[in-house]
Image (cartoon, grey):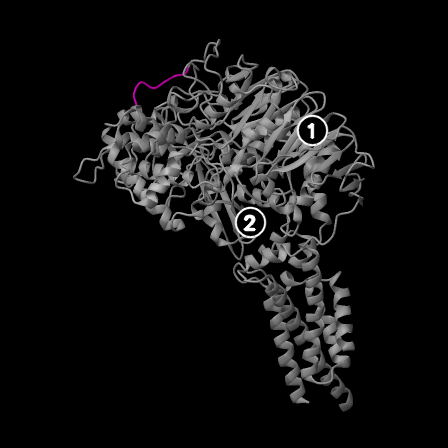
Amino acid sequence: MILILLLALSAWLLSLIFPWWSLAVPAILLGAALGRTGGSSFGTGFLGIGLLWFVQATYIHLANDGLLVTRIADLFSLPHPWLVILITVLVGGLAGGFSTLTGYLLGKVLSQARKTV
Amino acid sequence: MARNLTQLLISAATTLLLFWLLSIAFGPTPPLGPFFSPSAGFWANAVTSQKSDLQLDMPGGALTETVSVYYDSLGIPHIFAQNDDDLYYAQGYVTARDRLWQMEFQTYAAAGRLSEIIGPSMLEYDRYRRRIGMGCAAEQALSGLVEHPETARAVKAYAAGVNARINELNPAEYSLEYKLLDYRPEPWSPLKTALLLKSMTYTLAGHHHDLQMSNTRAYLGSSFIRQVLDIDPPLNAPVIPPDQKWDFLPVPIQQPDTVFKPSIATKIPPFRPDPHNGSNNWAVSGSKTASGYPILANDPHLNMTLPSIWYAIQLHSPTQNVMGASLPGAPAVIVGFNEHTAWGTTNVSADVWDWYEIVFRDSTLAEYRYNGSWRPTTQRVEKINIKGEPAVVDTVVYTHHGPVVQTSGSKKMRPGIPRYHAMQWIAHKRSNELRYFLELNKARSYEDYREALPHFDSPAQNWVFADHTNIALTAAGKYPLKWNGQGRFIGDGSDPRYDWQGWIPFDHIPSVKNPARGFVSSANQDPTGDAYPYYLDDDFAPYERGRRINDRLAAMDNITPRDLQQLQTDTYSYHAATVLPRLLRDLRKDTLSPLKREALASLAEWDYNNDGELSAPSLFHYWWEALDNAIWDDEYHAVSFPMERPARDQTAHLVLTDSTLSWYDNITTEESETLNMLINRSFHRAFRQLTKEFGPRGPRWKWGQVNNTNLNHLAQIPGLGQPNIFTDGARESINAIRGDHGPSWRMVVAMGPAIDAYGIYPGGQSGNPGSPYYDNMIDDWTRGKLYPLWFMKHRPSSDDSVTYMLNMQ
């Protein structure tokens, strides 16, 4: 849980300055440092970024009275505006999940390398 | 170890692949990663809070003094600057804050550069724009703009303001459309303003019927043209009152002694698009108003899009205080008012685009016949950059007339374009319309208006004018000197007598000031009666709107701004009022089904107003269209080339005056049809057609629905427009809303010590689909409401209701 919040917070801070892919940096680092298993790392990464993007998107959606999301839904021929938020969560979640998993596996290789030396 | 490494490599590769896939665009789909990112993607375009006051530091040395911009509740900026350079800089900056993407996109479209941002699907569009010489036209405009010191300073200051905005943006702040189409803004330049102004000439003076007319003459004969296409319906009321005396000696024009017969050998899809007009303007003198001061009204009709073509603005400096509608991309106010004067426009649509048959010496097109000898052509190389593909190079051949538009391809670039013909077009001439606008914005009197007018070349406009005591109207523009009928048909490109032989002198251009009837008006109809000694064109808007305006204004007294707002949304149809009784008389009623009887009853009691809530206008329009098709389709569809179709009021005139014409007979049947038979058949056909499109007669037959009004997004991006707008009005009414075309700006200005002005347009001040100001005026616009415009004489005080302000220094 702490890992999820830590990831969300650091990814959010980076996104204020850097492009969207900057979320991979904290995901890889946190995955390497704190990841326990492959599955949980992926899940943590998915939830961390997914949750961040969900909260941001939902806040914007509500504060904007749904004006823009309704138009984006029309644009992609989606029957309901909330599907736009769902896609957002999936995009962010997948990016976060795979990055964290890679970080975890990287950490594993690195620690093994250290032991061998 | 090896297993862990393999896992890592697989996972790393998958992650990289995923990030790569999320970073690239697939066809029209934007890159998903950046597009859906809440911090930088489309989410960042959603407006989530009220705007608050801003202190802005512009790049060093850009402004000489502080500029304040006050936004009112409609989102209209009121700019207060201490000199004109700062003023136009701020106008560029402020307009780009709201409309940058639109400004840029319009100039890409004008220049034929859409392939760069959209891809190969736009190549043919771009090629056409290049081939009609839009780049060449814009260069002419630019040289006109920079030649005059005042306009040069204005466009440069404006460009600097736009660039200041572009440079301060980070990608997250780019307009939604940049993110969707995955590109970024490029620097603004005065050439873009020139492109925009010449693009208006394309929109309003980009029509030509030479090929259709030549085909019609060849197929149906000169007698058809005389009997049908030359009809001037008796209700026609020219813009300039017909009793006007033309007390000048016209410039003599050399006319050929024989009629040139073009050797057309083209097969092209029929009919040009509907002429784009529907605009109205008028001014009433103080003798007819409640206040004793003139009132001016204008509603220019254009293709309506989101973002809107207009941007409302007030510009205040020590030399001027002006408000109205501006064109995003150009400095100054285009249609508006200041403390002393008001002005508005409708299109003249004179014939300023002519086609010439060219005899080339050989297939290299290097030389062409002119005045008895061979003349060299020139070439202009056009490089079209294409997104994701190598650039295409196209060489366009120019004669002294202008470019040879189409030389290859079996498909016509546009209907009405003959192959291997050269075009001559007013847009290719050097001009400086901006000078007119800058001067008019500062005008204090009728004399200032007349002094500014000669600078307005194209597209020719009926500029209506009022100050505190005068009203006036001038059909201003640069008109080629032509012999009667010149340029109506394809001309002989080798004969100098088919050249444009100079320009109609400014003092001879149709104009009227303070006429006895107490008002001036225009509605795209014929500018003058037959007594006017110069030839302008044979094809102007039908008479109905102009006639209705004149009838109403003549009958009105003690006029208030409110009365004129109502007149702008008048939906009376002269066309229906004259034609429908005739149709009803001939319709056999005894054999009608009960459903049709009901529909007929609604037509019989209709008051000829194109009211959106009624179904009678729907049935009438479908009936008329079916009748028009029944009369002409047999002749016009018998051939594979396009011919000129009679105008609505010309066909109406025939139907009303002569029931025995041979045109009523359908040449494809044995039977010989009469007008009476066509009227009956077309009634049933119209009923069937409406039932097919909108179901059995019921609420879906309401005219507001059938008229099919949509506000599409400028780049036709789905979801960003506003479809299915329900309104009153139709093409032959003053409120000439039809399909996507309609009153793009409605304005009423009452002159006097305190200007009392109203305005609205179908859209909103913001170009951002994520802003409530993107479309906030549409609903009131459909109801025919105009907003009082806050015309500030001084900077607002702290208790005035300014929404927020920018302080630029």
Please, what is the three-letter code of the amino acid marked with disc 2?
Answer: Gly
Q: Which residue occupies the foreground of this view, B680 or B536?
A: B680
**For the residue labelled by badge 1, is the local secondary structure a helix, a strand or a loop?**
strand
Quadrant where the N terminus of chain B is found in the figure: bottom right
Q: Which residue occupies the foreground of this view, A40 or B801?
A: B801
B295 in magenta: no
Please, what is the three-letter code of the amino acid marked with disc 1?
Answer: Val
Task: Give the labeled residue for mark 2.
Answer: B721
Majority secondary structure in the magenta region: loop
Task: Give the labeled residue for mark 1.
Answer: B322
Magenta part of the chain: B253-259
Extreme residue toward the right, this view: B798
The picture places residue B135, in percent across and down from the top left corner, at: 53, 38
| Residue drawn 51% across the image and 44% down it | B726
N-terminal label among 1 and 2? 1
Q: Is residue B169 above or below residue B13?
A: above
The picture places residue B754, in percent across and down from the top left corner, at: 72, 23
The picture places residue B682, in percent across and down from the top left corner, at: 30, 39
**For the residue labelled by badge 2, is the local secondary structure a helix, a strand or a loop?**
loop
Protein chain holding label 1? B
